[in-house]
Amino acid sequence: MAGATALPRENGELVFDAPSQGRIFGLALGVVRARGIDWEEFRQRLMAAIEADPARQYYESWIAALDALVVDLGLASAEELEARAARIDR
Amino acid sequence: MTDDHGHHPTPLTDVERRARALEELLTEKGVVSPEFIDSVVEAYAQDIGPMNGARVIARAWNDPAYKQRLVDDGTAAIAELGFGGPEGDHIVAVENTPSVHNVVVCTLCSCYPWPVLGLPPNWYKSPPYRSRMVREPRTLLREMGCEVPDDVEIRVWDSSAEVRYLVVPERPAGTEGATEDELAAMVTRHAMIGVARP
């Protein structure tokens, strides 16, 4: 799958710095669309995540925002997310 | 399940684990399909990017009536060229003139007109850009290689919850005979954000 294995380029520049960034971006769009909610729901959490830790890498704030949205929507618990992350080894 | 993401010789970072955990759980729960994610990644890697905005600007340069429609209702005008979608519901085009230079920032996150510019570059999302562009635009623009004469007013547009701004740069001199394709090739992403003057 081109999206998962290639680093996408456009106009000679990387659109995503790493494949995982593209996955998270697509995931955020997918969650918003699947639940029929406004992008604003994600954006508010992104702003909050950035404000909570302005020095951290932008992409990490994005993940923090998506974690918060997913938990707030009742799609997964914080414990589930943590437990799964701990089990991933490849 | 096959590992679609290829071989990882180095250990995953904490961030990558969290990203993977989100995708695994949400796809297992049927909230999002991997195919949807693939299609989004492909769309933003291939089809959606500043080359779209360049066509809009070239059309505006070539067709004064279109430029007026673009300034009046950016979302409707870009739709005429087939562009639209997420982050494109409230696009406002701001026109550069000999006396006004426009530049766009999102001070709180990274709001950006995706349908015409694709996803924002890293520098646009960085804390220094976000804070300095509203405080010292002329200095920051100069540092970025964009010299704005002192007699030209700089207007900084801070993207809000709804509005996404697109700068319409001034048409370069001596381009009267250029085709729309040639004009589009002159329009850069930097110019449409307002950090360059073609």
Image (tube, helix red, strand yellow):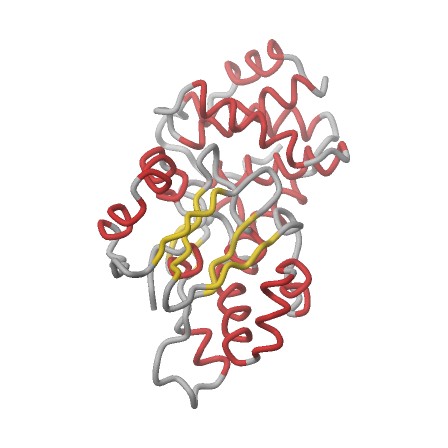
Q: Is residue A23 above or below residue B22?
A: below
Q: Measuring 70% from the left and 27% from the top, which residue is drawn there?
A: B28
Q: Quadrant of residue B76?
A: bottom right
Q: For the view shown, which residue lies furthest in the right direction?
A: A36
Give the side of residue B102 with respect to residue B180, left or right: left
Q: For the view shown, which residue lies furthest in the bottom direction?
A: B177
Q: Measuring 43% from the left and 44% from the top, which residue is drawn there?
A: B105
Give the side of residue B118 with respect to residue B171, left or right: right
Give the side of residue B166 with respect to residue B145, left or right: right
Number of disc labels: 0
Nearest the eye: B43 or B93: B93
Q: Measuring 45% from the left and 45% from the top, which residue is drawn there?
A: A16
Q: Position of residue B174 (x, y in %)?
A: 35, 85
Nearest the eye: B125 or A7: B125
Q: Quadrant of the C terminus of chain B?
A: bottom left
Q: Quadrant of residue B11?
A: top left
Nearest the eye: B57 or A15: B57
Q: Is residue B159 above or below residue B197?
A: above
Q: Measuring 47% from the left and 26% from the top, which residue is drawn there?
A: A61
Q: Position of residue B139 (x, y in %)?
A: 24, 47
Q: For the view shown, which residue lies furthest in the front direction?
A: B151
Q: Quadrant of the N terminus of chain B?
A: top right
Q: Is residue A27 above or below residue B89?
A: above
Q: Position of residue B161 (x, y in %)?
A: 59, 37
Nearest the eye: B181 or B101: B101
Q: Position of residue B100 (x, y in %)?
A: 39, 61
